[in-house]
């Protein structure tokens, strides 16, 4: 048996020694343009590549894709090559990057380094339907709806004024600035940061990612398991936060009666409310501690598991429910 094994290994080594070995750099460029008009949808599958979308004033979608890879291999066969599918039909333009399949027998094959980039110029009225894996997306100055699905890549959007932006993400991070319209973000472990935005309705549904919103306005609905939720210098009339172990830190003001609801399990809750607000408040807990430091508050009920009261005429409602977390309600400076 040992003799047979030695013979087999020797044969394998001999085959490897006789096999062609090569190391090469693959570099390819793709370029395509499409004449478009308002109402067209761009479907972009950018995979592991990075995508940058730039608005311009021409009624043309201009796509440039650059691919580069360093490959080392020992064996026989045909190497996989990257291709891009371009297609236009009715009101849809499709751009899809495709990794080819390797055929043959390879005893060793390694892609030391590879990357590809999409640079797209398009009129900002184009509706975007985007899908990526590990690649990053950068987009600014857009005026049409955006739908984006990403695995581990990051998403960066700025200066977006539209009706609706929807993002699905796995582990990547999202950075949004100067957005208007409705926003929906669903994901697992990625963090979300929103700054300087005037939004209508915002929906977050995350697993472990953190949410941080600063210097913005809108109505916010957030569900998160272990992540933290932080709203700093936010103007809102409706805020609904549901969490498990993460902390909730809210700094809220409003031009109308506020309706704020926070439900957590073990996370601590700190809420700072504008002096101009008038509301009733109710805090319920199991083992947590409650601190109320609201200007002009009139306490109506206080015992071990329930504290309630009123500020001003009590037009709005602030409700907090927690199991083991601590709760602090204060007036903002």
Image: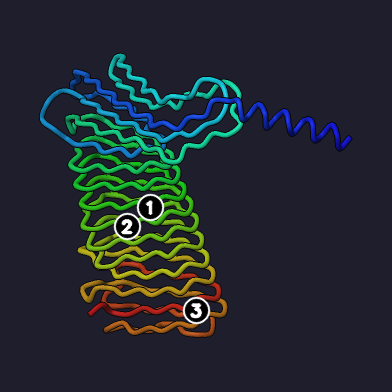
Q: Secondary structure at mark 1?
A: loop
The quadrant of the image that shows the N terminus is top right
**Do labels 1 and 2 touch, CB within 8 Å?**
yes
Which residue position is annotated with label 3?
306
Nearer to me, 65 or 10: 10
Q: Which mark is residue 173?
A: 1
- Which secondary structure, mark 3? strand
148 or 183, which lies in front? 148
Please say if the residues under marks 2 and 3 sit with CB atoms less than 8 Å apart: no
Quick check: 234 above or below 89? below
Image location of residue 223, percent across then percent down: 45, 56
* Residue at image mark 2: 193
Mark 1 crowdedness (10 Å alpha carbons): few <14, some 14-19, many ≥20: many
Label 1, label 2: how far apart the Cα atoms are: 8 Å
Task: Check the image and report above or below for 208 versus 147.
Answer: below
What's the CA distance linking mark 2 and mark 3? 33 Å
In this orientation, which residue lies closer to the viewer: 118 or 291? Answer: 118
Residue 252 pos. (x, y %): 28, 68
């Amino acid at each position: 048996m040992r003799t047979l094994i030695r013979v087999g290994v020797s044969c394998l080594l001999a085959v490897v020694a006789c096999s062609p070995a090569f190391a090469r750099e693959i570099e390819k460029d793709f370029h395509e343009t499409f004449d478009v008009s308002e109402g067209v949808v761009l479907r972009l599958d950018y995979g592991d590549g990075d995508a940058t979308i730039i608005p311009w004033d021409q009624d043309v979608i201009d796509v440039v894709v650059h691919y580069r890879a360093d490959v080392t291999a020992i064996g026989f066969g045909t190497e996989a090559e990257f291709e891009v599918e371009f297609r236009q039909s009715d009101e849809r333009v499709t751009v899809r990057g495709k990794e080819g399949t390797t055929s043959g027998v390879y005893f060793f094959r390694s892609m030391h380094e590879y990357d590809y980039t999409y640079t797209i110029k398009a009129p900002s009225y184009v509706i975007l339907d985007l899908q990526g894996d590990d690649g990053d997306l950068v987009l600014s100055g857009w005026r049409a709806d955006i739908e984006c699905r990403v695995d581990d890549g990051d998403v960066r959007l700025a200066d977006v004024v539209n009706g609706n932006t929807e993002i699905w993400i796995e582990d990547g991070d999202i950075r949004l600035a100067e957005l208007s319209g409705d926003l929906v973000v669903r994901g697992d472990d990625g963090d979300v940061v929103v700054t300087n935005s005037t939004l209508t309705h915002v929906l977050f549904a995350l697993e472990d990612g953190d949410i941080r919103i600063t210097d913005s306005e809108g109505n916010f609905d957030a569900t998160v398991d272990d992540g933290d939720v932080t709203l700093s210098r936010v103007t809102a009339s409706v805020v609904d936060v549901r969490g498990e172990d993460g902390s909730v830190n809210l700094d809220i003001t409003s031009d109308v009666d506020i309706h704020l609801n926070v439900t957590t399990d073990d996370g601590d809750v700190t809420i700072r409310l504008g002096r101009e607000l008038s509301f009733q408040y109710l805090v319920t807990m199991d083992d947590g501690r409650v601190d109320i430091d609201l200007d002009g508050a009139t306490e109506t009920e206080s015992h071990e598991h329930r504290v309630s009261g009123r500020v001003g005429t009590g037009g709005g409602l602030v409700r907090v429910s927690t199991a083991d977390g601590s709760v602090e309600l204060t007036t903002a400076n």
